[in-house]
Image (cartoon, grey):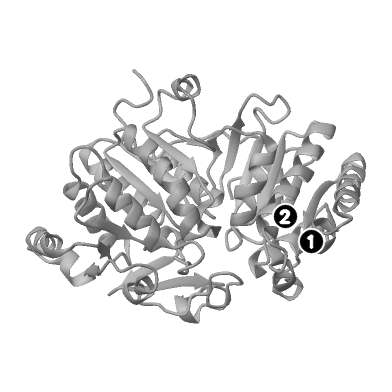
Amino acid sequence: MTAQDNLLLSYYGDDLTGSTDVMEALASNGVETVLFMDAPDETLLKRFGHCRAIGLAGTSRSETPDWMEENLTPAFRWLKSLSAAICHYKVCSTFDSSPKVGNIGKAVEIGKALFHQPYVPVLVGAPQLKRYTAFGHLFAAYQGEVYRIDRHPVMSRHPVTPMAEADLRLHMKDQTALKTELADLSMLAAADADQRIDALCEIADGMVLFDVDSPESQSHAGRQLWRLKREGGWFVAGSSGVEYALLMAWNSAGLAKGRATFPLPGKADRIAVVSGSVSPTTERQIRHATQNGFAGINLDPLELLGENGSAALERAINNGLDGLKRGESVILNTALGPSADRGGDIDRIPGSRHRLGRLLGTILRRLVEEQHLTRAVIAGGDTSSHALKELHVQALTTLLPLPQTPGSPLCTAHGTHAPTNGLQIALKGGQVGSDGYFSQIRDGLQG
């Protein structure tokens, strides 16, 4: 059997943390999954021939439509060649995007054309992540309260793609000429749901958005996604709510094994963390970590990006090494919360955000190599996508899901670079995780 046989799902993640979010959801529920950093050669693909889901980690969340046209087209074509039942373009559950950056509509257009579909199903709600869609509007939790996304304390003020519209149909109008139909909560729950949704899909020629606000509506939506699929692969878009919904359908059909068990990996003596996140969630996590045995090292992103960047880079590495040699875990960050955000200045330097992510990856690789670390963390969705490439990692698998904070599992890295092959690494989005997240990863605990 080759890796392409009997695949339930292939997917492209628009950033790295989102990609591991999908991998965690699937692996936790008995669907063995591998996430590749780039399209693998046949030899690497065959190493994971037992997997029933294959992912490809990308960076499109922080890219332009022109970049998408050039890069998503071959990526989607490779995923299509795997002949999985479903091919998923995975986006963040906060759906933050804009016409110029991370344009979801553009990605849907590319996938729709490549898969020759009359419409593309879209599903965003994921109650497991406290994300909900009701009658086309997106809601997300923050600090125990649920907000409409355009009133969310963080996402309404996102430094790159602020969410100013909660109605996802209107949000998408700015990104594509494709029309969005809605399979709303009442339609999904109706006794004649199949007939009503068939009639809706019959007239759809762009996208069909499926509401999800609860386990019940998630089950309804998952059944519809699986029922509506076509031979030769079925392209869908949305958050990891797609996987959570499909898992319900697969469990009913006996296609998934149910909850999987994972042994605890134990406590690491020291770990290294690099963070490019400006999120208040990550700020709290950094402050908690420095109060619980981590050495905090603040980095000036403009120094790293400036004329004397090489010296700043070596200084950062040496500061990290000093902490590790003292027996401490270290956490190096370019911003301690929104008040320290230098995004405006950073954006004046062309290509600076991607380069900053790569620099953080270089710092982390050097710390791992020189101190023989076995565990590490990268914080920040966009940061993770660019930083991990500097660690020469080719693939990831799930080592330890974190059910209390889904979307940020501890992974095992695979590749030909000896110091990072087998590295245990967690990739954390800015909004993800409890305050004690970094300590939790150091200690190898699920919750």
Q: Element type at marker 1? A: helix
Question: x, y percentage for residue 285?
Answer: 70, 61
Q: Are marks 1 and 2 in contact (CB under 8 Å)?
A: yes
Badge 2 density bin: few <14, some 14–19, many ≥20, Cα 10 Å: many
Question: x, y percentage for residue 200?
Answer: 13, 65
Q: Is residue 123 above or below residue 166?
A: above
Q: Is residue 338 above or below residue 261?
A: below
Tell me the kind of residue under disc 2.
Answer: Leu
Tell me the kind of residue under disc 1.
Answer: Pro
Q: Residue at x 67, y 49 (%)?
A: 378
Question: x, y percentage for residue 260?
Answer: 43, 36
Badge 1 density bin: few <14, some 14–19, many ≥20, Cα 10 Å: many
Q: Nearer the viewer, residue 412 or 96?
A: 96
To which residue does mark 2 refer? 356
Q: Is residue 300 above or below residue 8?
A: below
Q: Is residue 420 above or below residue 150?
A: above
CA gap, disc 1 and disc 2 = 7 Å
- Along the horizontal axis of the image, is 197 left or right of 377? left
Residue 10 is at least partly visible in this image: yes
Q: Residue at x 75, y 38 (%)?
A: 365
Question: x, y percentage for residue 306?
Answer: 83, 59
Quadrant of res 175:
bottom left
- Along the horizontal axis of the image, is 344 left or right of 66? right
To which residue does mark 1 refer? 301
Q: Element type at marker 2? A: helix
